[in-house]
């Protein structure tokens, strides 16, 4: 079993839809949780990071962490074609710097 | 925000030659930098972790003599692919962490093609 599980997709939605992206994990020691967006042939771009459980909102993006269920989510409201990319979840322990990534979910937003 | 500059963005080299990739933190001091390799449609694979002024820590299965990492200053780390072969062709990405941030910043990546 992988430490972090993420559905690879692709996930296809129409423009304006609400998108839900999720990851599950097995290591209860993870404390920092991140979402990255990666366009083809580019490096990942940090979208959101959260420490421990809770919600965090930034514009059209909302990140949720449920440590009791070992489940994290990223919601994208009013999705746009420019949101079409691969979304990677990542997490790490407190004080231990190596990130553990999910496989990434490919999102396609059609006009 | 924090910016990590990676160069070159793409490089083509002949088999048997060496290639150096640079990763610079532009507006912060990076105590730790990470080097990843990414195959098409796959996630990032951590190759090594480098701390300024000390030897890099390589992940299991990564040849340290082939992938030389140098982190001579708090703003620069380099990855040298020595005696490159076609199977080394890949997308290489660096990432940097700085003390107070939990989210790491990535460079734009280098596409290496060995012919």
Image (spheres, helix red, strand yellow):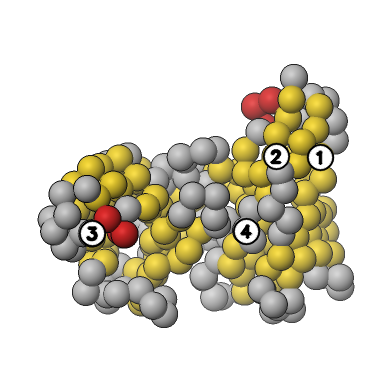
Q: Please name the residue shown 77% across and 49% down the image.
A: A21
Residue B20 at x, y = what percent? 20, 53
Residue A107, label in figure: 2
Say few, some or many: other residues with alpha carbon within 10 Å of mark 2 (under 14 / 14 to 19 / 20 or more): many
Which chain does the numbered disc 3 sit on? B
Instruction: Look at discs 1 and 3 and give the one toward the viewer.
Output: 3
Q: Mark 1 or 4 closer to N-term?
A: 1
Say few, some or many: other residues with alpha carbon within 10 Å of mark 1 (under 14 / 14 to 19 / 20 or more): some
With respect to residue B74, does B114 lie above or below?
above
Say few, some or many: other residues with alpha carbon within 10 Å of mark 3 (under 14 / 14 to 19 / 20 or more): some
Residue pointed to by mark 1: A19
Q: Mark 1 or 2 closer to N-term?
A: 1
Instruction: Look at discs 1 and 2 and give the one toward the viewer.
Output: 2
**B51 to the left or right of A18:** left
Seen as rendered, the residue at the extreme left is: B17
Count of numbered badges drawn on the protein = 4
Dots 4 and 3 on the same chain = no
Residue B97, label in figure: none
In which quadrant of the rendered image does the N terminus of chain A lie?
A: bottom right
Q: Is the Cβ of the residue at disc 1 closer than 8 Å to that at disc 2?
A: yes
Dots 2 and 3 on the same chain = no
Residue pointed to by mark 4: A103
Say few, some or many: other residues with alpha carbon within 10 Å of mark 4 (under 14 / 14 to 19 / 20 or more): many
Residue B85, label in figure: 3
Which chain does the numbered disc 1 sit on? A
Q: Please name the residue shown 81% across and 27% down the image.
A: A14
Mark 1–mark 4 Cα distance, whole angstroms, equals 18 Å
Seen as rendered, the residue at the extreme top is: A111
Report which quarter residue B60 is drawn in. bottom left
Q: Please name the residue shown 51% across and 70% down the image.
A: A98
């Amino acid at each position: 079993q992988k430490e972090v599980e993420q559905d690879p997709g692709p996930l296809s939605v129409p423009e304006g839809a609400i998108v839900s992206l999720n990851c599950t994990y097995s290591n209860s020691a993870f404390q920092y949780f991140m979402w990255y967006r990666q366009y083809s042939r580019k490096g990942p771009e940090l979208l959101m990071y959260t420490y421990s459980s809770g919600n965090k909102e930034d514009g059209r993006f909302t990140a949720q962490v449920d440590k009791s269920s070992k489940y994290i989510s990223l919601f994208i409201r009013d999705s746009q074609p420019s949101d079409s990319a691969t979304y990677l979840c990542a997490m790490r322990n407190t004080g231990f710097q190596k990130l553990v990534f999910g496989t990434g979910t490919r999102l396609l937003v059609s006009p | 925000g924090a910016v990590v500059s990676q160069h070159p963005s793409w490089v083509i080299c002949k088999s048997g030659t060496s290639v150096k990739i640079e990763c610079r933190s532009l507006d912060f001091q990076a105590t730790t930098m990470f080097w990843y390799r990414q195959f098409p449609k796959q996630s990032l694979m951590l190759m090594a972790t480098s701390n300024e002024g000390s030897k890099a820590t390589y992940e299991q299965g990564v040849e340290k003599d082939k992938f030389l990492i140098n982190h001579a200053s708090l703003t620069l780390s380099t990855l040298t692919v020595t005696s490159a072969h076609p199977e080394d062709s890949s997308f290489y990405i660096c990432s940097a962490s700085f003390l107070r941030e939990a989210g790491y910043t990535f460079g734009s990546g280098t596409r290496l093609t060995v012919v």
